[in-house]
Amino acid sequence: MPEPGLGHVRWVGGASGAGKSTITGLLAADFGLPVYSTDKLIGAHGTTPGVDAPLLARFGAMSMDDRWLARDPQTMLNTFPWFAGERFDLIVRDLRTAGGRSLLLAEGFRLLPRLVHPLLEAPWHAAWLIPTPECRRAAFSERAEEEQFWLRTSDPASALERLLQRDALFGELVMREARELGLKTIAIDGTRTSGDVAEEVADWFRLDVSTAGKEA
């Protein structure tokens, strides 16, 4: 049975570089919905005491070179705390109380299919966006300089390549999990505008102007 109290949430997950924030921003504007960004809460959730998170503790103790240069992409994938679902319980806690029962959009790479699936009241409450390697690379290159954390390593070019390889593995993992659970995935390959993708997501979520902002 799904966990009670989350039927008002529409989940937009997926790998980095897929345009999750852009898509949810368009939906928020079109339908008057609030957005819960899990990315923006990484800092707060990362420092919340009293929650067991061994991978997060080890990651926090690493230097930038240890994180992004010293390990192979598969190890980086396997040991990244957010990919392992650490502190996902804090997301659930927030969403249980956010906005009462009014519809809201939750977005971010931390919304793993295996973790979201038990919370869904219906399969059409969630979708995962999966970018191609080309789209992912383009998205990373367009990030603001302060967001290009790999620049703070001793070899930024190599760190970026390892990061892209790691995130490609993560995208494959997310897609496989979603499909095995019968959940919707949307390929982001650069052939459609963000508006077109947002329209597909809105149709999947059964959003319309008559129900937006009302209780689920």
Image: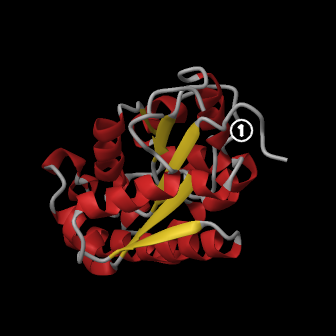
Residue in the image at 79% along x and 45% along y: 2
Name the residue beneath numbered marker 1: 52
* Left or right of residue 132, residue 183 in this image: right
Residue in the image at 63% along x and 57% along y: 84
Residue 107 coordinates in the image, percent (x, y): 45, 46
* Residue 72 in sight here: no
Residue 10 coordinates in the image, percent (x, y): 53, 45
* Residue 38 in sight here: yes
Residue 21 coordinates in the image, percent (x, y): 33, 48
What is the secondary structure assignment of the residue under circle 1? loop
Q: Quadrant of residue 182?
A: bottom right
Of residues 99 and 168, which is closer to you in this image? 99
* Left or right of residue 41, residue 198 in this image: left
* Left or right of residue 92, residue 175 in this image: left
Determine whether 136 is above or below 21 in the image: below
* Left or right of residue 35, residue 173 in this image: right
In this rendering, the count of numbered labels is 1
Which quadrant is the C terminus positioned in? top right
Residue in the image at 45% along x and 28% along y: 213
